[in-house]
Amino acid sequence: MPSSCPICEQPIASTAAHCAVCGFPTGLAIEGLRSIDSAAAEPDAAGSALTSLATARPSRPVPAPSPEHELTQTISRDLLGKMELMRGLGRGPDVTSELCQAALIEAEGRVAEALDILRSAQSRLDSETEQVLDQRVRLANERRRSLQATGVRFALGSDFERLNAALAAGDRSEAIARLADAERRVGQFESDWRGLQGLIAQIEGLRNQAAELHFPLGEISSELEGLRERLQSSEVTEDALDTFAQEAAQVLMLLHEAIPSSLEEELRRAGLTLDRFPEDHPPASLARRLHLEAGRHLKKGRLSEAIQSVRELRREIEALERAPRPLPPEPPVAPVAPSQIAEAAAPPAGPLESDDEMLDRLLKKARSLAGRVRSLPPDSDAALEAAVQIRQATELLRSRRLKEADQTLTDLMRTLADGGLSARK
């Protein structure tokens, strides 16, 4: 009998019926060696010889795994499945390090120690999973309540009903799947709702600014109110919210089409008004700057800024129109002789003059007398009295009380004549 197995070349005891390693029958050892020798001598026959030997060799029974080994495998699969399930919610509890440690220890034959590590990991994973689920469910409900607080009923009721039912039944797998769906839909509603609110805020801002300036807006206000009513009238789905956003964008576009024409007309009228004032007129300089600024904003499409500039421009122009117009430079005035007083005080010969003609005559008289006032000694009684009368006459002319202004100017001429006579005396 050969001392080694012809298959695995391991030593064979003389009393053994089979090879302890591969299970080859020792009774066939001589035939096996011969077959191998013939296979070496005849390469073409090697395959058939080895096939015959393999067929003749009985299969070696595989030892059954121990119960401890089966338990470690079961716990490991459970842990892997739970971690994979939690990945549907993003990053969650992780016991990968414990799984690796248990596998190495089990390979060394310390199965009981590996089981202790796996059981500890299982307990930690279950505890942390419950905490994560509770926290995420609470946060999802808070986000849902925040959405509902806006006055819009979003179609989220069924999602949270199914989630709560899964939690109550203890079906963690179903609860995690329902929570992931609820979080996804809440996030989508939050994003779409923020976009729609931004559009509505732009519409309201432009509409209110334009309404302050009494710009015609047509049916834009009613369109906005109709959109608000539809938002609050029924449960809002994702598709409905998208439709509302498209409607709001359409209303905003209508505003951007309506407001520029009103701004252009306002700037045109303001330009004509400013043309009536001299270029070097200081009070009109701010209005001209606002006029240019509003035009630049309008050209660049910045409607809100353009409306603000036009609002300020309108106030400046109103102030300019209330203020008296600047008078041209006064010509030098000769001293008034007493003999001229009666001529100036006498009513004009010929046909009666109109109010405009009278105003023009009195303005010339006022300018003439103002020059005479400046020629008087500044501290004299005549100068003080004349200054008071010229100021009264100016106010009367501004309010177009022409007869009273004429009488005041006549009195002023007498005052100036008396002051001149006194000075000569």
Image (tube, grey):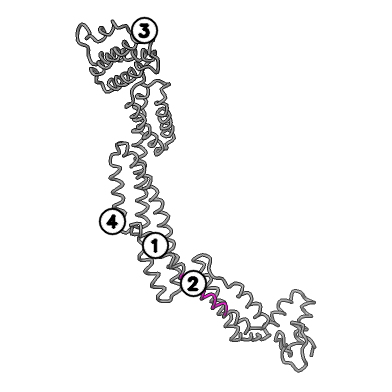
Q: Quadrant of the C terminus?
A: top left
- Tell which circle, 4 or 1, labels the residue nearer the N-terminal end: 1
Residue at image x 38%, y 51%? 197
Q: Which residue is mark 2?
A: 131
Residue 265 position (above or below residue 342): below
**Which residues fall within the magenta stretch?**
120-134
Amino acid on which the number 2 mark rests in the picture = Gln
Q: Earlier in the sequence, mark 3 or mark 2?
A: 2
C-beta proximity under 8 Å, tags 4 and 1: no
Residue 180 image offset from top left, x and y in percent: 45, 65
Find disc 4 in the rendering and name its residue.
233
- Label 2 or label 4, whichever lies nearer to me, is 2
Residue 146, image x, y percentages: 39, 60
Instruction: Considering the whole magenta stretch, tell me its main secondary structure.
Output: helix
Q: Kindly identify which numbered label has been placed on residue 236.
A: none
Identify the element where label 2 is drawn: helix
Residue pointed to by mark 3: 424
The residue where tag 1 is placed is 144
Q: Earlier in the sequence, mark 1 or mark 3?
A: 1
Circle 1 crowding by C-alpha within 10 Å: few under 14, some 14–19, many from 20: many
